[in-house]
Image (spheres, rainbow, N blue to C red):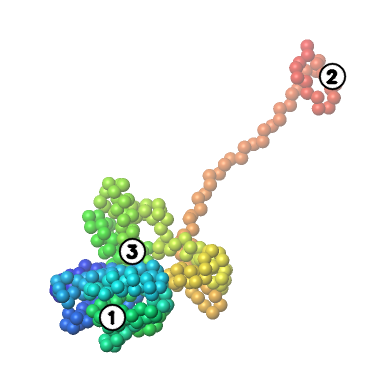
Amino acid sequence: MQNNQSELFDGLIGQDKAKRRLGFYLKGYNATGICPHLMFVAPKGCGKTTLAKAMGKLLTSKEDTSKPKAFLEINCSTLKNVKQLVNQVLIPHVQHKECTILFDECSELPRDITMALLTILNPNPENRTTFSYDDYVLNFDFSQHTFMFATTEAQTVFHALMDRCERVDLEEYTFSELGKIVNLTLPSVKFDKGLLDDIATVLRGNARAAQKMANNMAVYLKAKQSKKFTRDCWDEIQHELGISPLGLSPIEIQILGELGKVKDCSLTHLAAKTGLTKACVQRDFEMYLQKMDLMQITTAGRAITKKGKDYLEALEEPKVEQPKVEKKSKPVPIKLKLPARIVTKMPDGFIPKKNIK
């Protein structure tokens, strides 16, 4: 079984530290049959769910060691109360069989469900045979089950819940690892030398973004009926999809533009200009701009960095000189000279329509 475990983890690109940590827990599980509850923490798109599922497949059933325990993934935003937890999760999946349960985005769990789960995750094995909360009393052997949690916002997870789990932190992917993900998704495509690293610079360390970009490339190459992806192809895709350097979104570029106009810009000003909440600006946009050293936050407010100014200057399209248009001379009015025998004297402004013989 150990060889199969190694092969499964080796099939996942990156996250070496997290895989070593999980490998340690697997050794303990194979020896004792006990696996600690796990809390996967990482930014979006870094493979929390994928790694948790891979770990779940390696936790074999005690009744049949050739098969993994049943695996259940739950989107925490769908759980509203303890009654739903009991009737949809605990009774059908925990009462009669060994299972591994993953609570994805556990920061969205209501407080009453979190408090109920704390009774299940009690570190004292003697207290893990009964679930008692409000009017519910269930006699289950919870020691046979493994609970996993995943979140992008560890700071919002209830501290007691975090304390009952072993925390597994995942890191953003390197350029090299992102290039491998793109190449693995498109195994039959040939890339220009060094192009995969350039593509990785716009993927923001995100494996999900790498897979989406690979899908876009596949569509492009299929339309071109080609299996070679060159720098010209990449330039064309960037232009058609509106991909900015470093993968910045239009809102992030807008924020940089405001910082370039306003000295010591406030968060309130940025929220008003973008039409977003202050929390959204902080959480979804400022963090990446700071990470890329494009902006900084001081006691006086938000400010653009030199790198940020250089970024905006590079985005400006060169001005195209308009061709000079020659000025047309004004038409010269034609003065009619009438024969002397016709007109001897006429009123001012009078123009004859025909000659009179």
Amino acid of disc 1:
Asn
Q: Nearer the viewer, residue 47 or 246?
A: 47
| Labels 1, 2: front one | 1
At label 2, counting other C-alpha atoms closer than 10 Å, the crowd grade (few under 14, some 14-19, many 20 or more) is few
Sequence-wise, the earlier of marks 1 and 2 is 1
> Residue 160: horizontal and vertical position, in percent?
38, 84
Locate residue 231: give its quadrant.
bottom left
Which circle marks residue 7 in the picture?
Answer: none
Residue at numbered disc 3 = 208
Residue at numbered disc 2 = 344
Q: Relative to residue 324, is residue 335 drawn left or right? A: right
> Residue 119: horizontal and vertical position, in percent?
34, 83
Q: Nearer the viewer, residue 251 or 315?
A: 251
Residue placed farthest to the top in the image? 357
Is residue 22 visible to us here? yes
> Residue 226: horizontal and vertical position, in percent?
27, 48
